[in-house]
């Protein structure tokens, strides 16, 4: 576990240096221009990628097209095209687990971007490159939906009967990140406590939604007072005026995301140029401003208290693990 | 006689000659060529992707990868007792929402077309509006209105009557049926209204002459004559409800109600590990249920002649004078339109000017914003999506209606052997949920010799394949009512098939054709379940754009785009109505 403040202190100079250069050779850009355009598949929010694509085009003159879907569907489509011998995407942006599964199938080629040097060594995967962001799951609540004395203080609190019918979260048998989150709770709570927490949470009959975003929206709208969701939504909805806050806990579990170059990328140089730009300072700052926990040295999200969050990475689950957990959580939460 | 024939036994030569003469006679008719071409196109469009879905349900590998034959997917899907409870849920949901939508549509169509209720023209135009709203927005708006904790309508009841909590809970089977019925009503309205406009008044006049009152005429003559259109609307809406995912995703999941589509999503497509084979297997289950309804529909409408009400003697339906009751009728229509149009549009408009999605408080009014509309105005991605969607909708709807008109003529009017197959073929892809169908299409066309994969054209093929039944039903319910004597008169006067089709049938079918075209245009402008899988970078239409903005929590932008789509669609509908002279003369 690494405190985000440590990265700030250690690497401020790197961040300043990084902002002046794209870290790309003119030869690569020239070759990329000959490719004409770059096509990216990913699960990263469209607004974020749109902003990055605009500035990428401005800097390099290369067109970029983005196909957006959930991480599961990105994998489905990319792998289907790969197996059929008709690859379309040059690069993929998705969550850790999905990227590793695709990598095992040989979907990616190794590419050491010059910008890798601006990331802490701990976050660089030998095959996939830098883990460019962490998405952290925690408790977000509506300050008007509860009395101040009722604000939850920790995850344990959500097991108390006073929160019965007041919690919204994704269906853990359907939403993969929630499955992983529950399966990884032992890392911050211990095994026995995490198992008891799950039973207590189930007894409080959480309201199921499709994913972590509608969970946050129901809290922002005041429909449900407490949500299990990404803590970044406390910043995103708070900025728009929603009376929301998040529970500051010393350790929070989260997932990681990667960008990687496709092994059969039809426009390999344009793909490399985009990966370089995506991991560079400018695009990482764009993401951080939108509340993302970016791993590039010296870049922090504007969420209050973000520097004090201890990030604990979720366990990667195998296909069998997911199937087993789905059965287990069906018994605990749905029966 | 050729040398080959000379060497054959006489009986075989005769049989062969007889066959050739039959084939020659068949092919000498222009209608036969039309039949061959139309049925070939429809067979290819529906069977090719459907094959991949069936194959997927019977193999142990993902579609596109060679695998082994297995029945394990069926064992897994249907040995689970939960499968039967969710089948029952889907059935209740489908029957309930289709039934309620037909009741709403029938009431609205009767008031606007057959009575002298005031403002009926306005009611008629606005009744179509909900069809152009993305269903997910209608569901969201009703969640804002009737959720048990802070729904706006519940809030009004609590304030007015001092209740502890509001009387409505949208998170229930009743809520689910109600919202889906509202979404489906415009489709039923278009089909029933088109048939109602083409009704022969002479039967009703005869009944009146024989002493029947208005209610008796309505019960004994009007509604029985409308039976094909009512059944068509109910059948379409039942299948549409059973395959719908938007409303269950927003309402059923928090209510802990499982239906077929949410099960497919949870078990096979939405969660990891994905299982296309299992999705295809559940899809086959829905297909089976849908086909039972198609069979019932075919039985109900088998006696085509008994529904022929448009004859050469003139066919403008007469208007029923309600006297003082006309205000009550207008009141009923107004209430329906408040539920169908006013409340959802008001909520949408509200969401479009809120800085974030929430139930408004006094503080809200100080923070209203136009930024979501500015986004629509200033973003090239949005402009491109509008262009892509309009192009796709126009071409697909037109192609669909041409195919549907020809297919409908062959099915209803000719005695050609095998004509029933056309309707069966059309219904196959329609009966699959959009997502499963899209998977089939994706795989069907990924290795297709003509490079349509990853282009805008694969979406066009998908739209025509999946939504042809909507066009077919709209035309069929009208063509059934057009009596053959008009065509026969045309043929007696020396006109050929094409001339009769162009001069007699097309003008007579115009209400149905235009109704179908409008339905399809509005569906295509907001379709996303199939498009989501098929669109590629650079060809993003409005459906996926709306979906991803929704996924990213940009409900204000979604509402703003939804409102712009509504305005465009209203203009299109007005133009189409004027062009078709649907309700004039």
Image: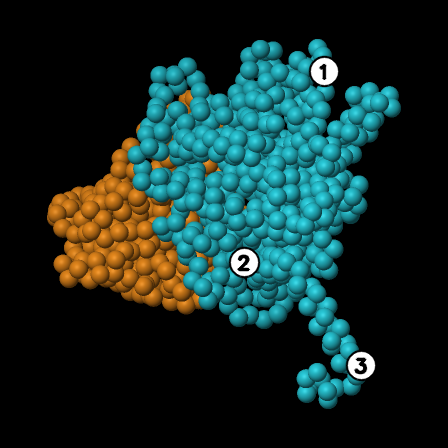
Along the line of sight, the residue nearer the viewer: A312 or B14? B14
Q: Which marked residue is nearer to the observer: mark 1 or mark 3? A: 3
Q: Which mark is residue B403?
A: none
**Which residue corresponds to the image point at 64% horizontal and 24% vertical from the top-left?**
B112
Judge from the rendering whether residue A44 lies leftward or rightward of residue B55; answer left or right. Answer: left
**How far across and down, in percent of the image, does residue A69 sit?**
42, 49
Q: Is residue B368 above or below residue A163?
A: above
Which element type, helix, strand or loop, lies under badge 2? helix
C-alpha gap between disc 2 and disc 3: 47 Å
Q: Which mark is residue B11?
A: 3
How far separated are the C-alphas under marks 1 and 3? 72 Å
**Same chain shared by disc 1 and disc 3:** yes
Instruction: Quickly name the residue at label 2.
Output: B440
Please tell me whether mark 2 or mark 1 is closer to you in this view. 1
**Mark 2 to mark 1: distance in Å?**
52 Å
Name the residue located 31 percent from the left edge and 40 percent from the top edge. B380
Mark with earlier residue (2, 3): 3
Q: Nearer the viewer, mark 2 or mark 3?
A: 3
In this view, the residue in front, B420 or A243, is B420
- The residue drawn where x is 54% and y is 66% is B61
SS at badge 1: loop
Residue at image point 55% right, 41% down: B517
């Amino acid at each position: 576990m690494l405190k985000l403040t440590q990265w700030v202190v250690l690497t401020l100079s790197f961040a300043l240096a990084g902002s002046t250069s794209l870290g790309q050779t003119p030869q690569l850009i020239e070759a990329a221009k000959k490719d004409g355009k770059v096509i990216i598949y990913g699960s990263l929010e469209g607004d974020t990628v749109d902003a990055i694509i605009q500035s990428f085009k401005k800097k390099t003159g290369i067109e970029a097209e983005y196909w957006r879907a959930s991480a599961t569907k990105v994998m489905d489509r990319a792998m289907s095209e790969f197996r059929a011998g008709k690859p379309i995407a040059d690069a993929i942006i998705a969550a850790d687990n999905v990227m590793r599964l695709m990598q095992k199938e040989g979907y990616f080629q190794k590419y050491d971007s010059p910008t890798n040097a601006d990331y802490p060594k701990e976050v660089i995967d030998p095959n996939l490159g830098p883990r460019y962001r962490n998405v952290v799951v925690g408790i977000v609540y509506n300050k008007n939906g509860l009395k101040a004395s009722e604000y939850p203080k920790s995850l344990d609190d959500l097991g108390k009967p006073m929160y019965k019918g007041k919690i919204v979260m994704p269906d853990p048998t359907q939403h993969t990140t929630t499955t992983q989150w529950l399966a990884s709770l032992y890392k911050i709570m211990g095994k026995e406590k995490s198992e008891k927490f799950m039973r207590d949470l189930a007894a409080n009959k959480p309201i199921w939604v499709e994913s972590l975003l509608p969970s946050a929206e129901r809290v922002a709208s005041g429909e449900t007072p407490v949500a299990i969701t990404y803590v970044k939504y406390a910043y995103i909805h708070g900025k728009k005026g929603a009376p929301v806050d998040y529970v500051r806990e010393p350790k929070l579990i989260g997932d990681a995301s990667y960008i990687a170059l496709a092994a059969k990328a039809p426009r390999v140089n344009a793909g490399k140029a985009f990966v370089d730009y995506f991991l560079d300072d400018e695009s990482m700052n764009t993401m951080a401003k939108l509340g993302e926990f970016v791993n590039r040295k010296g870049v922090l999200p504007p969420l209050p208290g973000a520097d004090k969050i201890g990030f604990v990475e979720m366990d990667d689950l195998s296909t069998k693990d997911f199937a087993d957990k789905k059965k287990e959580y069906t018994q605990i939460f749905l029966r | 006689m050729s040398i080959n024939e000379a060497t054959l036994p006489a009986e075989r030569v005769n049989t062969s000659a007889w066959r050739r003469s039959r084939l020659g006679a068949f092919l000498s008719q222009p209608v036969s060529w039309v039949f061959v071409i139309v049925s070939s196109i429809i067979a290819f469009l529906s069977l090719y992707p459907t094959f991949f879905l069936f194959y997927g349900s019977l193999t142990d590998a993902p579609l596109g990868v060679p695998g082994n034959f297995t029945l394990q997917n069926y064992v897994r899907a249907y040995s689970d007792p939960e499968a039967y409870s969710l089948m029952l849920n889907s059935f209740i949901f489908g029957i309930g929402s289709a039934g309620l939508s037909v009741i709403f549509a029938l009431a609205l169509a009767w008031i606007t077309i057959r009575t002298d209720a005031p403002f009926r023209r306005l009611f008629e135009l606005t009744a179509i509006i909900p069809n152009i709203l993305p269903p997910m927005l209608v569901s969201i708006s009703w969640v804002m209105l009737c959720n048990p904790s802070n729904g706006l309508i519940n809030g009004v009841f609590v304030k007015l009557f001092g209740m502890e909590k509001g009387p409505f809970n949208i998170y229930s089977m009743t809520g689910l049926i109600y919202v889906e019925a509202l979404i489906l009503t415009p489709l039923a309205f278009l089909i029933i209204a088109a048939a109602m406009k083409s009704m022969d008044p002479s039967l009703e006049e005869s009944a009146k002459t024989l002493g029947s009152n208005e209610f008796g005429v309505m019960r004994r003559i009007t509604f029985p004559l409308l039976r094909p259109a009512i059944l068509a609307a109910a059948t379409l809406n039942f299948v549409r409800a059973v395959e719908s995912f938007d409303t269950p995703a927003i309402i059923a999941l928090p209510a802990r109600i499982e239906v077929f589509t949410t099960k497919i999503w949870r078990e096979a497509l939405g969660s990891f590990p994905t299982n296309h084979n299992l999705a295809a297997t559940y899809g086959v289950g829905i297909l089976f249920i849908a086909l039972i309804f198609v069979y019932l529909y075919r039985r109900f409408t088998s006696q085509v002649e008994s529904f022929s009400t448009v004859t050469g003697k003139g066919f403008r339906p007469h208007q029923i004078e309600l006297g003082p009751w006309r205000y009550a009728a207008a009141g009923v229509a107004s209430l329906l339109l408040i539920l169908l149009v006013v409340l959802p549009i008001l909520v949408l408009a509200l969401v479009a000017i809120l800085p974030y999605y929430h139930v408004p408080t006094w503080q809200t009014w100080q923070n209203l914003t136009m930024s979501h509309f500015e986004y629509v105005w200033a973003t090239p991605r949005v402009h491109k999506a509008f262009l892509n969607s309009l192009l796709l909708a126009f071409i697909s709807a037109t192609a669909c209606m041409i195919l549907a008109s020809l297919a409908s003529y062959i099915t209803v009017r000719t005695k050609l052997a095998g004509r029933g197959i056309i309707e069966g073929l059309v219904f196959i892809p329609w009966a699959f949920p959009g997502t499963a169908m899209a998977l089939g299409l994706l795989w069907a066309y990924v290795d297709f010799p003509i490079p349509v994969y990853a282009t805008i054209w694969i979406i066009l093929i998908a739209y025509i394949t999946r939504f042809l039944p909507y066009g077919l039903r709209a035309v069929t319910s009208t063509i059934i009512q057009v009596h053959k004597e008009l065509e026969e008169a045309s043929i007696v006067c020396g006109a050929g098939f094409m001339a009769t089709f162009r001069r007699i049938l097309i003008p007579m079918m115009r209400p149905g054709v235009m109704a179908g075209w409008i339905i399809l245009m509005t569906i295509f402008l907001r379709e996303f379940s199939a498009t989501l899988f098929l669109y590629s970078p650079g060809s993003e239409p409005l459906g996926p754009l709306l979906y991803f903005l929704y996924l990213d929590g940009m409900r204000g932008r979604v509402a703003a785009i939804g409102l712009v789509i509504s305005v465009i669609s209203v203009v299109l509908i007005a133009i189409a109505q004027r062009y078709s002279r649907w309700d004039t003369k």
